[in-house]
Amino acid sequence: MAQTPRKHKVLIASMSLDLGGAETHIVELCLKLQSRGLEVVAVSSGGIFVERLQRAGIRHIEAPLHSRSPSSMLQARKILAEILRKEQPDIVHAHARIPAFLLSSLCKKQGIALVTTVHGSYAVSLPLRLLTRWGCKCLAVSDDICSYLMENYDIPRRDIFVTVNGIDTGLFSPDPAQGEALRRELSIAPEEKVLLSVSRLDPDADGGVARLMEQAPLLRQAIDRLRIVIVGGGEHFEHFRELAERLNRQAGEPYILLTGPRSDIARFCNACDVFFGVSRAALEAASCARPVVLAGTAGYLGPLDESTLAAARETNLTCRGHDWPQQPCLAQDVTHLLEKGDGSFGREMVLREYSAERMADDALRCYRAALLCQKSARYDFLLSGYYGYGNAGDELLLSTIVENLLGRMPEASICVLNHSTTSASCRQEVALARRFSLPQVLGALRRSEVLIFGGGSLLQDVTSSKSLFYYLALLHTARLCGCKTMLYGNGIGPLRTAFSRRVTARVLRHVDVITLRDPDSMRLLHELGIPDERVTLTADEVFTALHQPLPRLDCLPQRPYLAVSLRSWPKNDARFEAKLADILDKTADKYRLDVLFVPFQKKSDTAICRDVSRRMKHPSGIFEGDSAQVLSAVTNARAVVGMRLHALIFATAAGVPSIGIVYDQKVSAFYEMLEERHTVDCEQLDEALLEGHLDAILQDDGAARRTVQAAAALKQSALQNAAAAQALLEGEV
């Protein structure tokens, strides 16, 4: 029977779970992490949201994390030590400085990864700076908090993950009936205009409410039938209640209502006409399609719209750095929003940028990075390939494999055998081991469940028999270390010598799962005696990465252009270069195209691109950029002529017709899968044949459409690679 991997357990530590932006963030995160399959345990001093967590099946443990008194902190530390001993979490996630400080030494002692979400900028002094512990990774709720951490605590940017206050857009959604019901409950008439504020009424958070109360008489004077509703509790609640009573007596009617703390905030958002506030509460109101005035303790931005969005986004909608205006303008802004009466902008913004799903994704990325930092880290997958050498194709291949594995298994931990351990060639969080360091390779194998050969033509002896025997030795060693093995969308061969074929066959008979990207590789394995039932024909993983051309760069030719991808090859000579240059000149003139050479691996490709370019009469360019820019150059071309297989794959995936110059059987095998015959031989470059192919794809209006259709089918096949890897990890193979 298949063994289900153990759920990762995360301990969420918060000062309290009473009404507040940070507290609501924590609750939503707990719920989303639980829905992603994690076991979540919360610890705090308690509060109004504890019941909601418990209803969802999330355990809560009480500890006095809200107090700065030495006795309370000592008591809390003792409780936390016992919790860690009993629960044995994989990750501890602290929110705010006190929980992080108390947990830091305890986590270090027990070898548990600690991360902290920093919700705001706190006072910085030398004693506080020395006592603050944020853990091995941080989550910052805005770009300015990220800068605050780097400037005040010297935290490297690579250790900070910028996240958002994720909103449950299902709970916080437009619901007029819900709003009408609450208005009846509060005795608010349908024709009355409700200005809502949701805020903690504590010294560090109630500055916005204080300003609102100051300007309440002006608002009442400017807006007929106005009701101001303030939701929230705290140390200053009684002060604001008395102030409201005084203002109501002066007005002769109870137009200001303080409700105290409430957990049904979505109902209040749907009952209001305009929201006044900041941060998470403002996002919740926006998610309910309510117009929002951004104003709070830190400052004033005014109506949330296109003109204020960038400034709002930078500070997590707190208005930090934006002072209140000298002249009262709140009444004018509220009146404007009442007349406009449309909150669709806010709803669309939240759906696009501030979903709870994104918040959970950010947290999981941070957890993965933190776990990978642990000296004893174990890996679900160890990826081996031609990674870290600056090849645009292999860089995208690695990134795509990692992305697809994590898409199916968000908690998976991944290590990559890379050329160096200083930088990875993928966007995601992975551990790195140096591929030619025996201690690092052996250490990674011993701590990994599955070794994956991630795409490419790794098992071949054409470029070098040394690389073939390196990879075969790696597969054999993995088996000795008790590590499962998989060839993941690989191309196999050519294998020129009998010895290469014999050794390869012997090793591959013990590989657990084999998926292949082309029929030629399938036929070769059949010849080697590998049982057919253990081999699956899929497709190159890159087909899952591209669905359309990437954004066109300004530095690309303005006219339609032909992209050309070449590589150095021993059998290429001056005649090859001259023939190709002549054909490119003719094609450029005939179809009024520019010619752009696109080196995929700068060190080895640029020289031949330059040699062919010099032989051309027609002006041509050589494009040099990073992997993303190279992809843009290929996928925005009118057509592609290439030797590099991944240049041809990228073009096909984006619906760009292509012609392959066959220097290796993998190129012809690729076109066999496309059921196209647009190839020419590298050794004997047939000028007439290449010209004919160019005419065919440049004159055929249906070529791009057929390319798109072929790519779609190959994408579906390529998705089987990650599914097979998951089945192997979970013991279903």
Image (tube, helix red, strand yellow):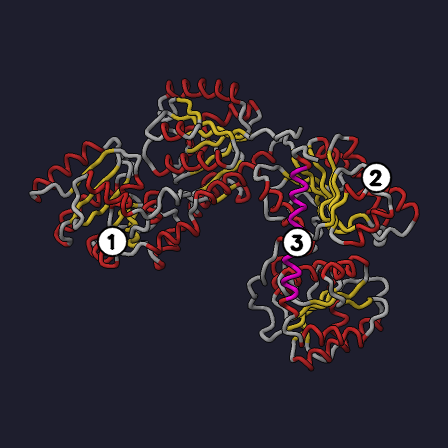
* Residue 634 can be seen, yes or no: yes
**Lower position in the chain sequence, tag 1 or tag 3:** 1
Q: According to the image, label 3 marks what residue?
A: 542
Q: Which residues are magenta?
A: 706-727
Q: According to the image, label 2 marks what residue?
A: 507
Eye-nearest disc, 1 or 2: 2
Q: Report the side of 453 relative to 220 (left or right).
A: right
Eye-nearest disc, 1 or 3: 3
Q: Identify the secondary structure beneath mark 1.
A: loop
Rendered position, 16 above or below 541: above
Q: Point out the image quarter for the N terminus.
A: top right
Q: Identify the secondary structure beneath mark 2.
A: helix
Give yes or no for contact between labels 2 and 3 (Cβ–Cβ under 8 Å).
no
Q: According to the image, label 1 marks what residue?
A: 325
Which amino acid is tagged 1?
Pro
**Lower position in the chain sequence, tag 1 or tag 2:** 1
